Amino acid sequence: MRMLKAYKYRIYPTKGQKKLIKVHFGACRFVYNWALEQKIKTKSISSTGGLKAL
């Protein structure tokens, strides 16, 4: 039987790196929410007999 191991690493970013991390995660959140909205819109259109999802 194979055992899986997990490792955790703690990072200590500088002030500039913290700012970039916040910007990056903000952009990721925006893209995720936009894609989720598109999926919901597409699903509602296809369920009402309109366009079908690709």
Image (spheres, rainbow, N blue to C red):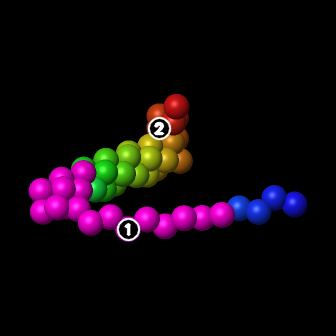
Residue 30 is at least partly visible in this image: no
Mark before the other along the chain sequence, 2 or 1: 1
All told, the count of numbered labels is 2
| Quadrant where the N terminus is found in the figure | bottom right
Crowding at dot 2, Cα within 10 Å, few <14 / some 14-19 / many 20+, comes out as: few
Amino acid of disc 2: Gly
Residue 29, compared with residue 12, is above or below; it is above
Indicate the position of residue 21 as horizontal and vertical percent values: 23, 56
Residue 47, compared with residue 52, is above or below; it is below
- Mark 2 sits on what residue? 50
What label does residue 10 carry, if any?
A: 1
The foreground one among 26 and 42 is 26
The foreground one among 46 and 12 is 12
| Boundaries of the magenta span | 5-24
Indicate the position of residue 50 as horizontal and vertical percent values: 47, 38
Which residue occupies 27% across, 66% down?
A: 12
Which residue occupies 44% across, 47% down?
A: 39
Q: Nearer the viewer, mark 2 or mark 1?
A: 1
Which residue occupies 81% across, 58% down?
A: 2
